[in-house]
Image: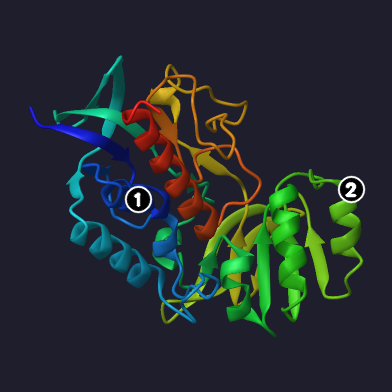
Amino acid sequence: MLMYDIIVVGGGPAGMTAALYAQRNGKSALVIEKSGFGGQITHSPKVENFPGSLSVSGNELADKMLEQILAQGAEIEFETVTSVRDEGGEKVVTTEEGGEYRSRAVILATGVKHRMLGLEGEDELVGEGISFCAVCDGDFYAGKTVCVAGGGNSALQEAILLAEKCKEVIMLQDLPYFTGESRLQDVLFARDNVRSLTEVKFQALVTEGGELRGVEIVHGGEVKRIPCDGLFVAVGLIPENGPFASLADLNSFGYFDSDEQCLTKTPGIFVAGDCRSKFVRQITTAVADGATAALAACRYINGL
């Protein structure tokens, strides 16, 4: 069985950056990705906050990253990793498809997935009317009306950013109250262009010609249509780190409990990207993690 220096689990920006740094440091790298390379950035029609690119689509940026690591000699496999076994100097990565791969170090860059509202046609509108990141996509809705689904800190922070640019921001919360910090609520609801509805039940997306035109809700026992140009969903993120909990501690939210050093309790196992505990989740912070984890893995392999 072929032995790799480093196996990277996950093909988002963090995972691909890790593979790039591994290869450039003379280590062989295998990236195992379960669906498609690029992770969350593929949902963004335009990325305008990545240094060196005035504007690039998320898919184009992902393709460039993939092309770069392949040119450096990294290998890829499309499989779903189910477990990583620590055998001291060797790590064994097994997949749902029956694959088994060995390496000296493993970098877990498993990412996260956004919690969705569960509405018909929701997936098809991601990046085409439905967004998750005001920093990434807020400029596309300048002077327009947007809805924000959610009531926690993330939703409030997204709405504060959107209120700086949008004509109107409509907060839609399923609970009777907002759960985010009162300080954030004070800042947001002091804005004249922000209004809110609580105890909302999301019923449907309103579309016309394949484009989002509003949200249908049940509020106060009545079905209402809220016209909007965009919907920002901020109802939580779901890390998928459970299968690796024996190797790396998880915090109460299920994220890898690791700081910027990207280390874990298991020698030779590292974490990178949105899957680890952090305050900011952006492409730039993901690629920073990838570089950090890869260099740490190289030092581990070299016995430093």
Q: Which numbered disc, 1 or 2, marks the residue closer to the eye?
A: 1
Q: Residue at x 62, y 48 (%)?
A: 235
Judged from the image, the secondary structure of the residue bearing numbered disc 1 is: helix
Residue located beneath label 2 in the image: 182
Q: Which residue type does callout 1 highlight?
A: Tyr
Q: Residue at x 84, y 54 (%)?
A: 184
Q: Which residue type does callout 2 highlight?
A: Ser
Q: Residue furthest left?
A: 1
Q: Is residue 31 above or below residue 105?
A: below
Mark 1 crowd level (few <14, some 14–19, many ≥20, 10 Å Cα): many
Residue 102 seen in render: yes
Measuring from the top left, give residue 7's x and y in whole percent.
Answer: 27, 36
Residue located beneath label 1 in the image: 21
Mark 2 crowd level (few <14, some 14–19, many ≥20, 10 Å Cα): few
Q: Is residue 298 left or right of residue 287?
A: left
Measuring from the top left, give residue 131's x and y in whole percent.
Answer: 54, 65
Q: Is residue 142 above or below residue 259?
A: below
Q: Is residue 28 left or right of residue 177?
A: left
Q: Residue furthest top?
A: 87
Q: Is residue 31 left or right of residue 233?
A: left
Q: Residue at x 72, y 79 (%)?
A: 165
Dividing the picture into quadrants, the one containing residue 147 is: bottom right
